[in-house]
């Protein structure tokens, strides 16, 4: 994307005792990243509108009654922010414990790393703690939905909606602990508006959405990311020119993605780009 | 809007007619494509679904699909909205449904859930507990509050906001309202001009009565000062805090006053339109307020007013969730800032005021801001409505100047030996019998670590049990959490689980510590006031009343 150089005002704030200057309109998270301060995020996606629902990125803002979500709080001149106070660490740890105690995070590498980093103990709520439980939904040949792994980050809804695909096949339904991602009346994907672009899979941070190929290989115990090589190419289906990353394991293409920072795709593909690699296998 | 894949099932003729009655007859210019007007009318989604349910008793696939199609709302989103609201049924059920309140005040009066009845959170009829709410769908649908008869006000002396109600001014007669001094405040406002009205309100030191106690003058000034000229005023009448019924009494018994006060708010802030959002469970208030709106066009001078009705969601009393609900979305609170005065309803500057707050504005204009501020205390000007229920002889609505003590209030209502008092509702806090000399002001309650909230005072005498009340409060927040943010969605569940174990005498090791940490993360990291206050009452019972120790 070509950035027009316009005169944008800079503002200065203080994060963990360090002064930092950011463009007006930047978030506290932007300021943290500029300073190299590691800030955990789960619902935040670089290509998506922040929904600030996971609350794992909260920071302490002097003068504010509660902690604030760094991903969406716009930085203001003179703000004094603390990211490593006891209060912040406690909240982040508790959020991770609440998530870990209610959702299957076994295929959520980021969340698992944060749990270790914050020394979170999800099992402190005991074996009877209520969990989010759903049957795995396998209703088509391209992807699998396992909502017992869903942390309700809204990223798939945003990717399916106005942020990327404008298909609106899924939304959040229900309320409270029963809230979940659903098609209308929970119809199957083939009955829904889904166009199988798979952009929801790309943004899912927990593996609740997964390609059928990955799901099957994981079931068979043959999925091995460490043995996968990523080959970058350009999708040949049409003239748009989407960058395509083909993930190859033992000479076989097992996944198709596009880089988030690619000017054209922002990580998105269409059904042909995402799943068309299977044609290669037919030769 | 993208091409939508729509639900296949057609609506029945009755459902189609009910939805068309809300949306107007469809313009079928080009096959079944929707008209431009419909495509910008998503805010009518909830009224359309409500109309369908009132006609046939539930929201069928056909009705959901037809409303989606008419409004160009993706069916998945319409389903998300329909499943958000507790009173909308997505499965077929009888046309005649009764909801039985099992909440705090009704529980103290022996609430029961009969066969086929649905348990319900507080219905706002606490002074005549135990209460029920019945909905009957059909060609002539109706809703009723049970018991239907309102009680006379228990207090006769020193009333200001409740004056007309005490005098028995007919709430269905505009003439009677005018004869009782109605619309004099509006005339005064027009004489003063918008800026001077806001100055009077600021000088009166009026604080919002919905629970957050924000200065009304400051709020109005902020909206008035916006560069954006399209603005709204919204009356938050989604009174759902367990134990609260003051706004219902005001709307049922003095609806013209609400319309007058909203018109003043519109005049002062420069808004062209106002909305009144009333919870679904207040059918009489719907009728009375709609009637008052219909009768008063001549007084409003072009200021438009529209009634909107909720569908069973406590969280919609949170101001930004209320906007989402009016806009036809799930009632999920927005992150603040930006605040409503800047980015409110439909993304435009909005002044949101509670019903009782607006009634006070009439008083401010009647006697002037300076004189208004003479009543009450330094930090809390004016009078306050208190909703008394539970173990008292004379439950009902009381009006006292700020500064009266809890003991004085309880003596008026006739309380016996007191074990505890819940101030401010489920989001409030318990105080013990040693705290009855607490002055009922914002500053004194804050210093004591409690809150006046929405004016709830539920009394527990020495026979009443507190642990079931705590469990009910925990259940309430678990049910009413919108589910958007992790601390509240999961925290309210963990809080309830821990309380159940404590109540059963089988706590985990370190249970109180864990409960305290869950409370802290809910208070510190939740998006809105629901999660931020969900542990207040429980924590206060543990700290002030030594429950579980």
Image: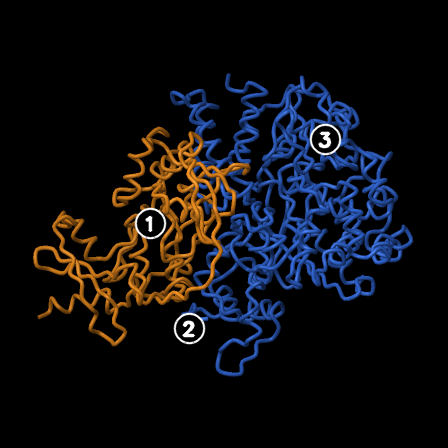
Chain colours: A orange, B blue
Crowding at mark 2 (Cα within 10 Å: few <14, some 14-19, many 20+): few
Task: Name the disc covering residue A147, or none.
Answer: 1
Task: Name the disc covering residue B3, or none.
Answer: 2
Residue A227 in picture, x, y percent from top left: 12, 50
Residue assigned mark 3? B441
What is the quadrant of residue B208 in the picture?
top right
Disc 3: which chain?
Answer: B
Question: Distance between the Cα atoms at labels 2 and 3?
Answer: 56 Å
Q: Secondary structure at mark 3?
A: loop
Question: Distance between the Cα atoms at labels 2 and 1?
Answer: 27 Å
Q: Residue at x 36, y 39 (%)?
A: A99
Horizontal placement of B86 versus B2: left or right?
right
Residue A273 in picture, x, y percent from top left: 23, 68
Question: Distance between the Cα atoms at labels 3 and 1?
Answer: 48 Å
Q: Are marks 2 and 1 on the same chain?
A: no
Disc 1: which chain?
Answer: A
Position of residue A273 relative to residue B84, above or below, is: below
Residue B428 in picture, x, y percent from top left: 61, 32
Horizontal placement of A66 versus B186: left or right?
left
Q: Nearer the viewer, mark 2 or mark 3?
A: 3
Residue A230 in picture, x, y percent from top left: 16, 57
Q: Residue furthest right?
A: B179
Q: Are marks 2 and 3 in contact (CB under 8 Å)?
A: no
Disc 2: which chain?
Answer: B
């Amino acid at each position: 994307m070509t950035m027009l150089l316009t005169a944008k005002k800079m503002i200065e704030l203080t994060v963990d005792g360090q002064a930092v200057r950011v463009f007006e309109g930047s978030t506290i998270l932007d300021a943290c990243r500029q300073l190299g301060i590691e800030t955990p995020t789960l619902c935040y996606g670089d290509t998506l509108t922040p929904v600030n629902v996971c609350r794992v990125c909260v920071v302490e803002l002097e003068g504010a009654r509660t902690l604030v979500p760094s991903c969406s709080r716009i930085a203001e001149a003179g703000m004094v922010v603390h990211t490593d106070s006891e209060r912040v660490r406690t909240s982040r740890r508790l959020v991770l414990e609440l998530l870990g105690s209610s959702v299957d995070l076994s295929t959520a590498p980021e969340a698992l790393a944060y749990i270790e980093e914050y020394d979170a103990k999800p099992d402190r709520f005991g074996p009877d703690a209520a969990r989010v439980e759903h049957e795995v939904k396998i209703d088509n040949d391209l992807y699998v939905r396992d909502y017992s792994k869903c942390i309700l980050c809204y990223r798939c809804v945003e990717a399916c909606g106005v942020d990327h695909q404008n298909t609106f096949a899924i939304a959040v339904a229900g309320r409270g602990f029963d809230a979940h991602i659903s098609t209308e009346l929970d119809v199957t994907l083939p009955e829904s508006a889904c166009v199988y672009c798979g952009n929801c899979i790309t943004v899912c941070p927990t593996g609740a959405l997964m390609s059928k190929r990955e799901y099957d290989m994981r079931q068979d115990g043959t999925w091995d990311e460490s043995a996968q090589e990523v080959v970058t190419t350009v999708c040949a289906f049409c003239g748009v020119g989407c960058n395509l990353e083909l993930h190859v394991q033992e000479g076989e293409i097992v996944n198709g993605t596009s880089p988030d920072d690619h000017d054209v795709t922002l990580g998105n593909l269409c059904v042909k780009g995402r799943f068309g690699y299977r044609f290669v296998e037919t030769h | 809007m993208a091409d939508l894949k729509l639900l296949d099932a057609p609506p029945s003729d009755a459902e189609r007619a009910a939805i068309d009655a809300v949306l107007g007859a469809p313009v079928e210019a080009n096959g079944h494509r929707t008209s431009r007007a419909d495509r910008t009318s998503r805010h009518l989604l909830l009224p359309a679904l409500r109309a369908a349910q009132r006609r046939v008793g539930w929201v069928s696939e056909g009705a959901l699909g037809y409303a989606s199609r008419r409004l160009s709302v993706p069916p998945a989103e319409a389903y998300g909205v329909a499943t958000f609201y507790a009173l909308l049924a997505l499965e077929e059920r009888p046309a005649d449904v009764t909801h039985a309140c099992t909440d705090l005040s009704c529980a103290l009066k022996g609430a029961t859930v009969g066969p086929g009845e649905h348990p319900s959170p507080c219905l706002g009829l606490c002074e005549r507990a135990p209460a029920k709410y019945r909905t009957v769908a059909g060609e002539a649908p109706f809703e009723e509050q049970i018991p239907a008869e309102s009680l006379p006000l228990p207090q006769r002396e020193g009333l200001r906001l409740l004056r007309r109600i005490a005098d028995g001014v007919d709430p269905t007669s505009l003439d009677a309202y005018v004869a009782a001094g109605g619309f004099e405040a509006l005339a005064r406002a027009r004489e003063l001009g918008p800026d001077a009205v806001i100055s009077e309100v600021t000088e009166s030191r009026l604080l919002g009565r919905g629970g957050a106690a924000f200065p009304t003058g400051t709020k109005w000034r902020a909206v008035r000062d916006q560069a954006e000229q399209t603005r709204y005023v919204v009356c938050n009448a989604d009174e759902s805090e367990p134990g609260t019924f003051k706004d219902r009494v005001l709307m049922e018994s003095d609806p013209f006053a609400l319309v007058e006060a909203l018109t003043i708010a519109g005049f002062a802030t420069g808004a062209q339109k106002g909305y009144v959002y009333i919870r679904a469970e207040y059918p009489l208030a719907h009728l009375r307020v709609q009637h008052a709106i219909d009768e008063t066009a001549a007084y409003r001078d072009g200021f438009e007013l529209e009634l909107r009705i909720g569908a069973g969601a406590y969280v919609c009393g949170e101001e930004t969730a209320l906007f989402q609900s009016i806009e036809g979305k799930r009632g999920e609170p927005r992150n603040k800032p930006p605040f409503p005065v800047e980015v409110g309803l439909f993304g435009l500057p909005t002044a949101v005021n509670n019903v009782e707050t607006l009634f006070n504005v009439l008083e401010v204009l009647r006697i002037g801001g300076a004189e208004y501020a003479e009543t009450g205390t330094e930090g809390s000007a004016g009078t306050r409505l208190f909703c008394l229920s539970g173990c008292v002889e004379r439950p009902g609505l009381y009006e006292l100047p700020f500064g009266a003590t809890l003991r004085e209030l309880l003596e008026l209502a006739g309380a016996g030996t007191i074990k505890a008092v819940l101030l401010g509702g489920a989001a409030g806090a318990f105080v013990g019998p040693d705290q009855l000399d607490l002055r009922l002001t914002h500053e004194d309650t804050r210093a004591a670590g409690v809150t006046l909230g929405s004016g709830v005072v539920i009394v527990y005498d020495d026979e009443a049990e507190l642990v079931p009340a705590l469990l009910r409060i925990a259940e309430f927040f678990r049910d009413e959490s919108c589910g958007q943010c992790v601390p509240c969605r999961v925290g309210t569940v963990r809080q309830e689980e821990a309380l159940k174990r404590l109540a059963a005498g089988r706590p985990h090791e370190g249970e109180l510590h864990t409960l305290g940490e869950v409370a802290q993360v809910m208070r510190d990291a939740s998006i809105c006031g629901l999660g931020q206050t969900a542990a207040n009452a429980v924590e206060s019972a543990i700290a002030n009343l030594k429950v579980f120790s």
